[in-house]
Amino acid sequence: MDRVFFILGSIFGFLGVALGALGAHALEHRLTPERLETYELAARYQLYHALALLATAWAASRWPGSTAALGGWFLVVGILLFSGSLYVLSLGGPRWTAFITPFGGVSFLIGWTLLAWAAWRG
């Protein structure tokens, strides 16, 4: 499981850098300042949680059978829902996409809580 989270963290990190560069260079003059800010928020949170997945890989190998792996999956879902919905919104997607974003945020919170629990129970 630790390898899976390391790979996912690396992929999400790569994509976060690539999408951030796209926003900074190709979309800077095509999006309104508000939409660009939303896009940058999506990339930032994606990168934060890509790093968290690398830490999850370590935690899953350190404490096998703990809740670390479950926490990692919540972080993955959080990236997809939170950052994904913000990317869609910033690029002019349907407004109802905004209702998905909080589910991603809650998923992040659950993931972090489960990682803390895994370390606590160690």
Image (cartoon, grey):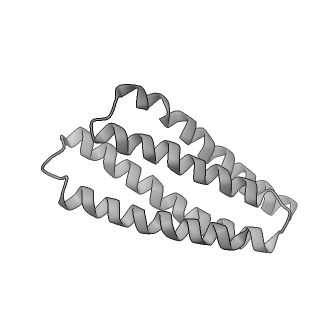
Residue at point 40%, 49% (across, down): 42
Q: How many marks?
A: 0
In the image, is 122 to the left or to the right of 78?
Answer: right
Position of residue 55 measured from the top left corner of the image (x, y, whole percent): 64, 68
- 121 in relation to 91, above or below: below
Q: Residue furthest top?
A: 96
Closer to us: 47 or 119: 47
Q: Is residue 13 above or below residue 94?
A: below
Residue 8 x %, y %: 57, 65
Q: Would residue 57 be found to the left or right of residue 66 on screen?
A: left
User: In the drawing, does residue 79 fall left or right of residue 117?
Assistant: left
Instruction: Examine the image and state in which quarter residue 71 appears.
Output: bottom right
**Quarter of the image where one finds residue 7:** bottom right
Residue 98 in picture, x, y percent from top left:
42, 31
Q: Residue at x 74, y 54 (%)?
A: 70
Quadrant holding the N terminus: bottom right
Residue in the foreground of this view, choosing between 84 and 47: 84
Establish if 75 lies above or below 51.
above
**Residue beneath the point at 35% across and 27% down:** 95
Q: Residue furthest left?
A: 29
Answer left or right for 108 relative to 59. left
Residue 119 at what x, y percent from top left? 79, 63
The C terminus sits in image quarter: bottom right
